[in-house]
Image (cartoon, rainbow, N blue to C red):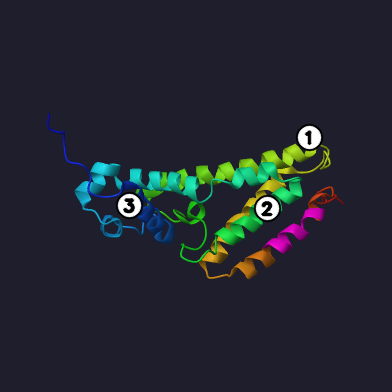
Amino acid sequence: MAERGRPRSFDRTAALKQAMDLFWARGYDATSLSDLTTAMGISSPSLYAAFGSKEALFREAVAHYRATESGGLQRLLDEAPSARAAIEALLRHSAERFTRPGKPQGCFIVLGAVNCSEASEPMRRYLAEHRALVLEGIRRRLARGIAEGELPTRFDVAAAAAFYVTVLNGLSLQARDGATRQVLDGIVDCALAAWDGLLQPRRLPRQKTRR
C-alpha cells in the first residue's frame, strides 16, 4: 500500500528552533512569514502544513523556549535552601542566561511581544500569562519562607515578588541593550541589598491632618 502524502523534507525540531530564535531576536510583529521561511529553510506551504499559522508557530516557539531555555527556573526557586537564596539563584541564573554568546540577548518571554499591533494583541497577552507564572512562582517561594518561619509574618509577599520580577524583567531589557554579565551581576547585587529593607515593616504614608 502506498504511503499517504509525502514525508516532510526538513527537520521539524530544527526548524522550530530557528523560528524561536528569530521571534526571540525580533519580536512577533517584526518577524514576517518571509523571514520565517528563510530562517527555517522551508516554503510557505510547508510552514502552514507543519505549524498551521504564524500565531500557532509563535505559541509553539514559546513552548519550545520554556522547555529548552527557561524550564529550570521553578526548580531553582524550590530547591534553594532559603527564600533569599532562591531569589539570588533566580537572578544570577537569569543574568548568565540573558548574556550567553550565540543566543539572542535577554528573555524571549519578556521581549517577544512587548509592543504589538491590535491584531497581535493575543500574542502579547499570551506572553503576559507566561510572565505571570514566574511572578506566581516567586510569590509561592516567599510564602513558603513565611510558613517555614524564615520570614516574618508581616513580610509583604506581593510587594516583594513584584519588585523582584521587575528586576528580572529589567535584566532582560538591559541585556538586550548590550549590558554584559558583569553589569547584570552588579544590578543583582543592588537588588539583593534591598532584601533587609523588605524585612522591615512598611511605613504607611502620613495622613494630612485638618486644621
Which residue matches tag 2? 89
**Residue span colored magenta:** 188-196
- The residue labelled by disc 1 is 147
Please state if 108 lies on the left or on the right of 140 as rendered.
left
Tell whether 187 sits left or right of 152. left
Type of amino acid at the residue the image marks with label 3: Ala
Residue 191 shown in magenta: yes
Q: Which mark is residue 15?
A: 3
- Tell me the amino acid under the disc marked 1: Ala
Corner quadrant of residue 193: bottom right
Magenta segment, prevailing SS (helix, strand or loop)? helix
Q: Secondary structure at mark 2?
A: helix
Instruction: Give the percent coordinates (x, y) of residue 194.
Output: 77, 57
Residue 167 seen in render: no
Q: Position of residue 209 (x, y in %)?
A: 85, 50
- Cα–Cα span, label 1 and label 3: 45 Å
- Secondary structure found at label 3: helix
Number of numbered tags placed on the structure image? 3
| Contact? badges 2 and 1 (CB < 8 Å) | no
Q: Residues within 10 Å of mark 2 (few under 14, many from 20)?
A: some
